[in-house]
């Protein structure tokens, strides 16, 4: 069985980049183990803390964040690590060539119900001539467009732990062998299946969306003589919804809403939208905000948010027109 290590070597991925990817994956194996032990490993439930997003942290958010930081801080090729759970980037090795960003545990609300959760990550190039190694200066190094990403992926902790990773124009799926604790190749060159009539949206936001998105959803669920109406699926964890779309096709929409005028969009650009857009594009799909391709967003705030509409290219076009 082809392991991720073999695959990266076969693709002749830069050895320093390989090392960073394998550090991320080493941490995800620990997270996968703790998740699989559930209540037995003491990872369920909430802490008393709030993260920078103002959300109550779950124990597993904190544990997953720490496991990733511990692995990456000691990697000599990582200059800094930005996490959804940290205010500012954590400085690692000065002058190192790569910046890493991750959502350590996406879908936290599913932790305690044994639902789908995952780790999402991206790797970006660090500036050639870096200045100060202070967190505030490092933050500015992340202010890049999504197209600069060198590699992005996620590990979905479901009934099995599934890694989907995109780099060098390829996207592959690996499954964690829980006996050998190795990620083994299970699907190569993933392509989004076309014409799946399935949409993914949190419908409880319907009346807070613009008329445009309300009309789109009305149009896909309206009984129609010619077409069968769409089915709906919503995991509450982007990692699960995107994995289904990569595997089975369809469209995911998380538009802006007017629930909270200070925060019209929910999903984070750096930790969710960028890596998922990179993966979806590599699989032949499209990923847009409400104003253009997500990959063209130029980040200007570490915890910036964006609307996300992604999936099959034809469906995304219909949704935005
Ligand atoms: P958490 O990781 O804080 O649970 O948020 C998950 C998420 O960012 C994304 O994975 C989901 O698609 C989205 O939020 C779900 O948000 P709602 O619960 O508001 O629908």
Image: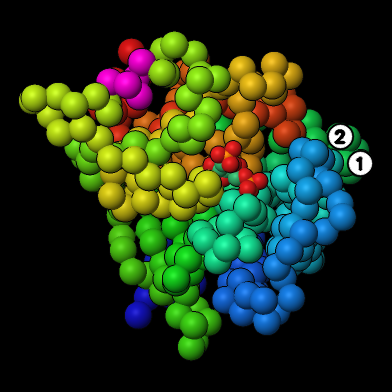
- Residue 168 lies, with reference to residue 159, above or below; the image says above
Q: Does residue 61 appear in this view? A: yes
Residue underneath mark 1: 134
- Badge 1 crowding class, 10 Å Cα cut-off, few under 14, some 14 to 19, many 20 or more, is some
- Rendered residue at 91%/41% (across/down): 134
Residue 155 image label: none
If the image is split into quadrants, where does the C terminus sit?
A: top left
Task: Name the spot of residue 261 as percent of width and height, x first.
Answer: 69, 16
Q: Which quarter holds ligand 1?
A: top right
**Residue 77 falls left or right of residue 265:** right
The image shows residue 144, relative to residue 79, as above or below, that is: above
Q: Is mark 1 within 8 Å of ligand 1?
A: no
Look at the numbered discs 1 and 2 and tell me whether their residues touch, using CB distance below 8 Å.
Answer: yes
Please give the name of the residue rendered at 73% of the width and 19% of the height, measured from the top-left corner.
262
Residue 155 on image: x %, y %:
52, 60
Highlighted range, magenta: 215-219
Residue 224 sits in quarter: top left
Q: Which residue is mark 2?
A: 137
């Amino acid at each position: 069985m082809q392991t991720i290590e073999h695959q990266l070597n076969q693709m002749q991925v830069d050895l320093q980049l390989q090392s960073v990817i394998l550090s991320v994956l080493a941490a995800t194996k620990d997270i996968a183990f703790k998740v699989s032990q559930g209540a037995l490993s003491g990872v369920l439930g909430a802490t008393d803390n709030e993260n920078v997003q103002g959300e109550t942290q779950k124990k597993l958010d904190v544990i997953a964040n720490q496991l990733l930081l511990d692995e990456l801080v000691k990697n000599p090729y990582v200059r800094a690590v930005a996490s959804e759970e940290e205010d500012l980037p954590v400085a690692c090795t000065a002058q190192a060539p790569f910046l890493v960003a991750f959502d350590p545990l996406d879908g936290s609300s599913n932790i305690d119900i044994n639902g789908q959760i995952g780790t999402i990550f991206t790797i970006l190039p660090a500036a050639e001539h870096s200045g100060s190694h202070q967190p505030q200066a490092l933050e500015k190094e992340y202010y890049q467009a999504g197209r600069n990403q060198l590699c992005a992926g996620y590990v979905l902790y479901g009934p099995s732990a599934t890694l989907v990773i995109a780099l060098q124009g390829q996207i592959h799926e690996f499954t964690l062998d829980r006996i050998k604790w190795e990620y083994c190749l299970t699907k190569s060159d993933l392509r989004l299946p076309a014409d799946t009539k399935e949409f993914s949206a949190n419908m409880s936001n319907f009346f807070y969306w613009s008329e445009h998105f309300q009309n789109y959803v009305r149009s896909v669920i309206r009984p129609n003589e010619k077409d069968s109406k769409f089915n709906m699926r919503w995991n509450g964890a982007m990692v699960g919804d995107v994995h289904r779309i990569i595997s089975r096709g369809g469209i995911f929409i998380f538009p802006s809403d007017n629930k909270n005028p200070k925060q019209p969009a929910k999903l984070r650009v750096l930790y969710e939208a960028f890596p998922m857009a990179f993966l979806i594009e590599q699989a032949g799909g499209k990923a847009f905000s409400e104003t253009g391709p997500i990959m063209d967003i130029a980040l200007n705030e570490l915890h910036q948010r964006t609307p996300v509409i992604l999936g099959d290219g034809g469906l995304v076009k219909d949704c935005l027109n």
